[in-house]
Amino acid sequence: MPAASEPDPASADGVAVTLPHTWRPFGVRVMGWMLVIALAVMMTVVWVGFTPEIKAQVTTFEKLTLAALGIGVLVCMHALTRSRVVASEAGLTVVNGYKRRDLEWAEILAINFPRGAPWPNIDLASGHNISMHGIQASDGGSSRKSVRTLRALVAAHS
């Protein structure tokens, strides 16, 4: 146990992290939902702008097709925006889209975030790698801080 004057080993830059802690991509969530809202507004404005004659020519099948496309866009945006990384005392939970991986700390060898990479990767003892879409390089300095924090947590739990 570190002395009171020493930073917590499971922290980055001397800032303690309370577990469980969740990291989510900010930019992806904001842009994803802005896209959905903009698309809905655009489709509504176009539909309102149609004359009654044009609206009468749109078949039920075409309406259902547009509804299905809208649902598809929502499903994709939900998959992108639900990505996250959760650190707990037991290990890491990585959610990428609709896939979830629960990892124990002992399984994790390293956290890598190569320059120019869109997100960091976890090197596992099994030889596999897992991308962490919950931490995005597009979030700038917060993504690098998140990786430093995760590396400190991995070191503290090894």
Image (tube, helix red, strand yellow):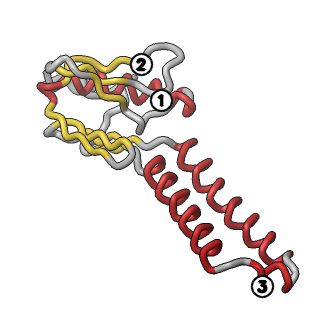
Q: Residues within 10 Å of mark 1 (few under 14, many from 20)?
A: many
- The residue indicated by pointer 2 is 113
- 62 vs 31: above or below: below
- The residue indicated by pointer 1 is 143
Upstream in sequence: badge 3 or badge 2: 3
Q: Is 6 left, or right, of 47 in this rendering?
A: left
Q: Is 80 left, or right, of 31 in this rendering?
A: left
Q: Amino acid at mark 1?
A: Ser
Q: Residues within 10 Å of mark 3 (few under 14, many from 20)?
A: few
- The residue indicated by pointer 3 is 56
**In percent of the image, x 72 and y 77: which residue is there?**
58
**In percent of the image, x 15 and y 19: which residue is there?**
125
Q: Are marks 1 and 2 in contact (CB under 8 Å)?
A: yes
Q: Amino acid at mark 3?
A: Ala
Query: Residue 82 or 79: which is nearer the viewer?
Result: 79
| Quarter holding residue 104 | top left
Q: Amino acid at mark 2?
A: Phe
Report x, y in % for residue 52.
84, 86
